[in-house]
Image (cartoon, grey):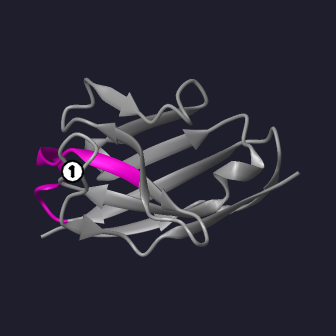
Amino acid sequence: QVQLVESGGGLVQAGGSLRLSCAAAGRTFSSYPMGWFRQAPGKEREFVAAITWSGGRTSYSDSVKGRFTISRDNAKNTVFLQMNSLKPEDTAVYYCNAGLIATTSGPYWGQGTQVTVSS
């Protein structure tokens, strides 16, 4: 079992940056691949980024590649999403996820954090 709590969302102007954090509770955190998904109003939840258990490999959706960076600190049971050059279309609730395979979500979700990008 892994419990996930996101933080760091907020309101930012287009072109700005935000850093999301996801704190995990559970002794097996370091064994899970971790990821971020997002859901905009009226749209389905979509994959954003993923990182392997060791942090050695990352992957991104085409829409955020080159602007977002996922990282993790296994000693602190935390995964991060650094978001730069934000666009209004990045506005969504961002969810942390544990146990994903490729771009398919795993069984553990956080409660989500709202990111709003104004034009």
| 12 with respect to 101 (left or right) | right
Neighbourhood count class around disc 1 (C-alpha, 10 Å): few under 14, some 14–19, many 20 upward = some
Give percent across and percent down for residue 102: 22, 39
Task: Please name the residue shown 33% across and 48% down the image.
Answer: 35
Q: Is residue 31 above or below residue 110?
A: above
Task: Please name the residue shown 24% across and 51% down the image.
Answer: 104
Give percent across and percent down for residue 36: 40, 51
The residue sitting at the right extreme is: 119
Q: Dot 1 lies on which element?
A: loop
Task: Please name the residue shown 22% across and 35% down the image.
Answer: 52
Task: Please name the residue shown 18% across and 38% down the image.
Answer: 53
Residue 111 quadrant: bottom left
Question: Is residue 28 in the magenta section?
Answer: yes
Question: Is residue 32 in the magenta section?
Answer: yes
| 55 with respect to 83 (left or right) | left
Which stretch appears magenta?
Answer: 26-36
Give percent across and percent down for residue 6: 46, 65
Residue kind at label 1, given as amino acid type: Leu
Q: Is residue 19 above or below residue 9?
A: above
Give percent across and percent down for residue 109: 31, 68
Pointer 1 residue: 100
